[in-house]
Image (cartoon, rainbow, N blue to C red):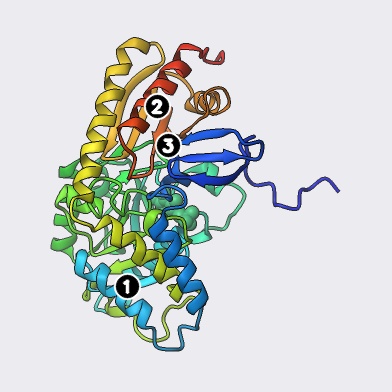
Amino acid sequence: MTITPLMPVYPRCGVRPVRGEGAYLIGERGERYLDFASGIAVNLLGHGHPHLTKAIQEQAATLMHVSNLYGSPQGEAYAARLVENTFADTVFLTNSGAEAVECAIKTARAYHSSGDNPQKHTLITFNNAFHGRTLGTISATNQEKLRKGFDPLLPGFAYAPFDDINAALDLVDDNTAGFLVEPIQGEGGIRPASQPFLQALRDVCDKRDLMLVFDEVQCGVARTGHLYAYEHYGVTPDIMASAKGIGGGFPMGACLATEKAARGMVIGTHGSTYGGNPLACAAGQAVLDVVLEEGFLASVKATGERLRGALEQLIPNHDQLFDSVRGVGLMLGLKLNSDSRAFVAHLRDDHGLLTVAAGENVVRVLPPLNIDDSHIAEFIEKLSAGAASYTPPES
Ligand SMILES: *Cc1c(COP(=O)(O)O)cnc(C)c1O
């Protein structure tokens, strides 16, 4: 037998973390890494945050799980808090980002199937999008590397170039249910949509009674210095998927919707065994306790600006390697002139610095949201040393 017990679908690297302390991961041999990857925008309070850890420990001992067949004081309180702090009127709780997007797709379709235009089922999505790994969510992207080998995929998606409003509008027809878009593409390479693009999608949705669905799985939950990135743009979706940082490391997701958008999601139309169980809600509440604290979002914005400024200062010193910085808040991307995967591996293996590669030769910089200036200084020092000692592979 040559297959590994853990299904070998990931190209796992040599970092083998066994412990975390704030913005650091500690490997099996005691080696330390500065973690500016945060489990891909998940550990937004860093590792071992006392408030989050305590909330999970206490809830685990009190009541971990009950079925969604029962009343949920924990789920009601948590959903009410999301509703109070967002555009949404109602929330479905999930265990992951892909499930949150699946619920968003179903909600958009159900909006139309329960109304006067049941033929409206197609969501227009965008090149380089990433919405997850389920059959539905890989159907929602045209990225060949995600789809290949899994045909037949789900019909009901059409694909336009990202941030190209005319191309998106050209695809609208009588079967269009709406648009599914990441306001800031994550895996695609930290690409923020332009404000006029998102506003124009909003306008056509209003005009034609379509659903604007935002996938904020990566850019949501305080990462941009706003609780959700739609606030940064001043463009409000009808439906939104959230996950990654929402449980601070506890597996959790949410599909948020307005009352109007959720009109088709009635009893019996959707469900999840684990979704929003008391343990997950305790984690979600603990994250909200911190990120909604007075001054937290402003501090993310300010920290993001300092980190971005420091990155921009570094570019001229290494202009063969570095091209530009992009992103919002603490969702930053450093665009390289060559393959980012090799450079991310070099930073990790030779400089103890964890970042994440993304599309378009971008190094994703996704630190915990509660880092301070000492972490920024250490990051810049390691990045600078990494750039100085790096030779890009022959292409
Ligand atoms: C990570 C991600 C997902 C999928 O989340 P999972 O929890 O891995 O299912 C969906 N959309 C976006 C934008 C993501 O970044």
Position above or below: 93 against 146: below
Of residues 41 and 248, the one nearer the viewer is 248
Amino acid at circle 2: Glu
Residue drawn at point x = 32 percent, y = 16 percent: 315
| Residue 3 shown left or right of residue 228 in the figure | right
Q: Residue 373: image x %, image y %?
A: 30, 32
**What residue is disc 3 on?**
36
State the residue at coordinates (25%, 37%): 303
Residue 22 visible within the image: yes
Residue found 18% across the figure and 55% down from its top: 294
Q: Which residue is mark 2?
A: 378
Q: Amino acid at mark 1?
A: Tyr
Q: For the residue carrying disc 1, how many other residues have a C-alpha within 10 Å: few (<14), some (14-19), or many (20+)?
A: many
Q: Earlier in the sequence, mark 1 or mark 3?
A: 3
**Horizontal and vertical percent position of residue 223:** 30, 47
- Percent from the top left, x then y, of residue 247? 41, 60
Hey, which residue is sitting farthest bottom in the picture? 70
Q: Secondary structure at mark 3?
A: loop
Q: Circle 1 is placed at which residue position?
A: 78
- Of the 4 image quadrants, the one containing the C terminus is top right
Give whichever of 221, 248 is nearer the camera: 248
> Dot 1: what SS?
helix
Along the polypeptide, which appears first: circle 3 or circle 2?
Answer: 3
Task: Please name which of the two marks, 2 or 1, marks the residue nearer to the observer.
Answer: 2
Identify the image quadrant of residue 256: bottom left
The answer for how far apart the CA atoms under marks 1 and 3 are is 28 Å
Q: CA distance from mark 2 to mark 1?
A: 36 Å
Mark 2 or mark 1: whose residue is earlier in sequence? 1
